[in-house]
Image (spheres, coloured by chain):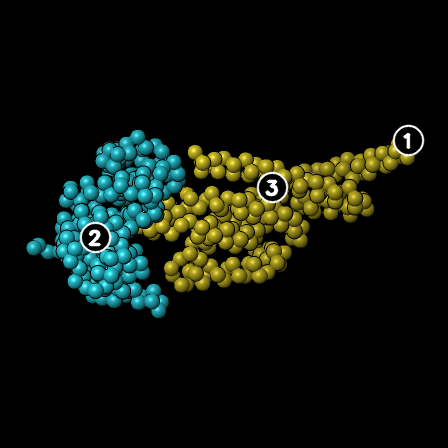
Chain colours: A cyan, B yellow
Amino acid sequence: MSEAMINVKDLHKSFGENHILRGITEKIHKGEVVAIIGPSGSGKSTFLRCLNLLETPDSGEIYVDGELINDKKADVNKIRQKMGMVFQHFNLFPHLTVLNNITLAPVKLKLMTKEEAEKKAMELLNMVGLAGKASSYPVQLSGGQKQRIAIARSLAMNPEIMLFDEPTSALDPEMVGEVLGVMKTLAQSGMTMVIVTHEMGFAREVASRVLFVDQGIILEQGKPAELFDNPKNERTQQFLSKVL
Amino acid sequence: MDWFNEWWSEVVRLFNKCFIEEDRYMLFVDGLGVTIKVSLLAVFIGVAIGFLIAICNLSSKRPLRLIGKVYTDVIRGTPSVTQLMIIYFVIFAAINWDKWIICAIAFGINSGAYVSEVIRAGIMSIDKGQTEAGRSLGLNRTQTMIYIVIPQAIKNILPAFCNEFITLIKETAIVGYVGLIDIQKAGDLIKTNTYEPFMPLIATAIIYFVIIKALTIIFGMFEKRLRKSDIK
């Protein structure tokens, strides 16, 4: 296989006394859709947030496209432009319209003119099925709509990688499907995706690989079918028996 | 009705003596101008300083945080009269600027400390997720502040800021200490010249009250309009 898009070596992170990540080593290749599952507090979100440096690792190395990103000399802002992030609580900008939420970053970072950004935004809104909401404000949208806009906002930066931090956990059950639908389309388009999720059905159907994280390490991983149907580790078995 | 006529003519006599004779009302007119000039300039200086100090206080750099903390501590820990007199008689002793400008600078420096706390609280009231969303899109810290955090913080800052402005106007009533004649000093002068305390002091109170009530109403309308954009 070609060089890994994300290459993580022996990643450690503590919050005070709490040793959250205890040495994660993993490679993620272009076009992979990696689902990260595991119990609450296992460190899966922290791991994801380390990948775009929303959390600063205590030790270890993270390479993106071969570049060491947790280096003092690394241009964090440039690196983040390559990685879209979708949050559990959407984090749309409430003072801006949907359209301006999407165009803000590309325009302010001078990657596109206002016209180009708006054209791109409308394409993305079409893709997520919300073209009619361009001039709405976030308060006027449902949770599922907000999350689809958040995905569009990240995609407007033309990222190479998309990170999802429990994107459906804050949604009403009937809205989960519309968000997963958009993510599925994205996965089929060849986007490299890393998804922290509790949606086991989605992980099984869409992911190309599943990582089971517990107590700060990757305990087991494999193709969805292997991991879900034939978990080898005892803790993986226990966890899956509770959630499936 | 004799008592009423007697009382009324006494009121008229006092009114004439305090405000009409020797055009004493002009003291209030000029004093009002001074109070307004000093307050307006001071509020601009206060906002500028307050913003800088708030940035210092929220900075990740230790020396800057220290500057912010010392500034706020010193200003909050000393009476504004003392600050005014130090600035007027010590710091600006050798500088020949208009009195009212020096006073405005003194009040601006004072107000800056309080405004900085208001701004800091407003910025901190914005959810951390907003900053994270901005940063994750590749915006740097300053861009995230300017385009995402501050526009949202302003709504939360405004009420407390209006409060600070009103406090500032009332605080300027001490400029008489350095010989500037504002509304308060005007009332005081009339009192000393006429030996009549009632009329000039009540008039002073009424003038301040009217200014501040008017401001409160204006700010209230402004705030309402801002809140409207929340509901949509």
Image quarter hosting the N terminus of chain B? top right
Q: In whole angstroms, how far apart are the C-alphas of marks 3 and 2?
A: 64 Å
**Circle 3 residue:** B36
Residue A43 lies in quadrant: bottom left
Label 2 SS: strand
Q: Earlier in the sequence, mark 3 or mark 1?
A: 1
User: Which label number is shown at residue A35?
Assistant: 2
**Can you identify the residue that label 1 sits on?**
B1
In whole angstroms, how far apart are the C-alphas of marks 2 and 1? 94 Å
Label 3 lies in what chain? B
Mark whose residue sits in front, 3 or 1: 1
For mark 1, name the chain.
B
Identify the element where label 3 is drawn: helix
Kind of residue at badge 1:
Met
Chain under label 2?
Answer: A
Q: Tell me the tag on residue B55.
A: none
Rendered residue at 61%/56% (across/down): B80
